[in-house]
């Protein structure tokens, strides 16, 4: 076969084959093909190749039954994009649990205790608050009743006693956890 | 309506995807019926012979599990081809590792097989099959996507990870190679 120099038309032959050309373009390509032996032969070749495509039986029902449920699919897509949000939620939930546990352990001392304990503990060991972020929720000391203050003082004594009783390497974890001295 | 025209009916696919998300399993059946034969054809044309149905199924499972990643500016079918091709290359890499053989370039990963074997009819068909076997893996992929599936150069570039211009060159080189073989 001699090569047709009309690249534009040759590029459109697969579209002609698939019936994917708009009316005007299709007429133009068909008119060229009617006049051009090379393009006619090329189109015939493409048609033969298309007809020779392998036919593979597909079990549609089996594939459909293997698909994830729509909800699961949505969740997967969401979670892949928003894992950081999820992690933040978990973190907050963990912090909340910690506070709740503190509150359960001393119901009479109410919600002010965890924050106060955290702040006092930090100053007692001279560290920063890096290890206690979830407890530093900013409660007001002035809300404390006398009974609560008593309880608090007991806590402070207890917590301060830990590093002071054993000041050296025997309890390194305390210092490290609270940001160092 | 041919497969190719239907695959360009974005609205149809997107509507079915929405319906499936709303709990309509029949929509999934329609989508799979519409596209699975073409995905299977493509996989076989790439030279895959074993567990083709597994690969096609994995393609749909992967696609339906990540439909939010599907950009409506390409066709669903093009996206499915892209996923199928990636799974195929993953499988071949794993096979190769298992056989403890050296890694070869991704462009060569589509194996050398007669893309038309098993369909031997007349002399012309046999000759065309032989001609296609002479194409490079990349040429055969591009040629098949263009002729059998009717994809545009842009979609082909997306599927095989190249540029539109490179896809066009691969296509014309493939046509040239086949013609020359048939003229001999
Ligand atoms: Zn021509």
Image (tube, rainbow, N blue to C red):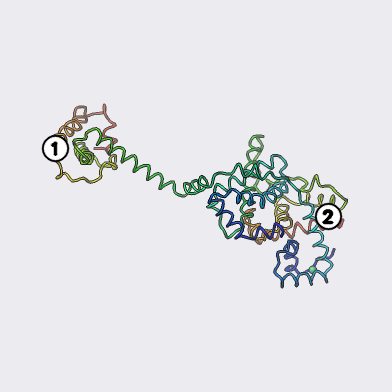
Q: Residue A92, image x and y in percent?
A: 34, 43
Q: Is residue A90 left or right of residue A68?
A: left
Using the image, name the chain to which the residue with label 2 belongs. B
Q: In this picture, is A94 found above or below B84?
A: above
Q: Are marks 1 and 2 in contact (CB under 8 Å)?
A: no
Q: Relative to residue A136, is residue B91 drawn left or right? A: right
Task: Say which quarter of the image contains residue B167.
Answer: bottom right
Q: Chain of mark 1?
A: A
Q: In front here: B4 or A5?
A: B4
Q: Position of residue A14 (x, y in %)?
A: 74, 62
- Eyeballing the image, is A160 above or below B126? above
Which residue sits at x=87%, y=50%? B122
Distance of label 1 from label 2 (alpha carbons): 96 Å
Q: Which mark, by number, is residue B153?
A: none
Determine the secondary structure under disc 1.
Answer: helix
Nearest the viewer among A45 and B177 is A45
Residue extending furthest toward the left: A146
Q: Which residue is mark 2?
A: B181
Task: Classify mark 1: residues with Cα within 10 Å, few (<14), some (14-19) or many (20+).
Answer: some
Which secondary structure lies at badge 2? Answer: helix
Nearest to viewer (mark 1 / mark 2): 1
Does residue A160 appear to the left or right of B146 in the view shown?
left
Q: Position of residue A63 (x, y in %)?
A: 63, 43
Residue A149's disc number: 1
Instruction: Write the residue at 75% across / 56% down.
Output: B174
Q: Do badges 1 and 2 share one subunit? A: no
Residue at (76% x, 70% y) in the render: A29
Q: Quadrant of the C terminus of chain A?
A: top left
Q: Is residue B22 above or below residue A114?
A: below
Where in the image, quadrant-wise, is ligand 1 located? bottom right
Mark 2 and ligand 1: say if the CB distance to the nearest ligand atom is below 8 Å: no
């Amino acid at each position: 076969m001699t090569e047709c120099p009309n690249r534009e038309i040759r590029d459109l032959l697969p579209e002609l084959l698939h019936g994917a050309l708009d009316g005007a373009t299709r007429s133009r390509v068909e008119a060229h093909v009617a006049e051009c032996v090379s393009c006619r032969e090329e189109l015939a070749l493409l048609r033969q190749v298309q007809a020779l495509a392998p036919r593979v039986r597909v079990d549609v029902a089996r594939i459909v039954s293997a698909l994830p449920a729509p909800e699961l699919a949505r969740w997967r897509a969401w979670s892949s994009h928003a894992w950081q949000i999820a992690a933040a939620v978990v973190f907050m939930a963990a912090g909340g649990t910690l506070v709740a546990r503190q509150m359960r352990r001393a119901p009479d001392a109410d919600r002010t205790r965890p924050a106060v304990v955290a702040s006092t503990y930090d100053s007692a060991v001279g560290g920063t608050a890096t290890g206690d972020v979830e407890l530093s929720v900013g409660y007001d000391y002035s809300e404390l009743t006398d009974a609560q203050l008593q309880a608090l003082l007991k806590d402070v004594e207890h917590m301060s006693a830990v590093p002071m009783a054993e000041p050296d390497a025997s309890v390194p974890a305390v210092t490290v956890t609270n940001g160092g001295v | 309506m041919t497969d190719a025209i239907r695959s360009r009916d974005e609205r149809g696919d997107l509507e079915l995807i929405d319906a499936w998300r709303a709990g309509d399993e029949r929509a999934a059946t329609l989508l799979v019926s519409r596209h699975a034969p073409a995905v299977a054809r493509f996989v076989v044309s790439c030279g895959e012979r074993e567990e083709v149905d597994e690969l096609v199924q994995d393609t749909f499972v992967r696609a339906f599990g990540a439909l939010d990643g599907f950009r409506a500016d390409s066709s669903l079918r093009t996206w499915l081809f892209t996923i199928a091709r990636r799974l195929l290359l993953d499988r071949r890499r794993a096979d190769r590792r298992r056989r403890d053989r050296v890694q070869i370039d991704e462009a060569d990963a589509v194996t050398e097989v007669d893309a038309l074997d098993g369909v031997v009819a007349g002399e012309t068909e046999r000759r065309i099959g032989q001609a296609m076997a002479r194409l490079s893996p990349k040429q055969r992929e591009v040629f098949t996507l263009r002729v059998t599936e009717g994809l545009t150069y842009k979609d082909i570039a997306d599927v095989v990870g190249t540029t539109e211009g490179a896809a066009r060159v691969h296509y014309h080189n493939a046509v040239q190679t086949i013609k020359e073989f048939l003229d001999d």
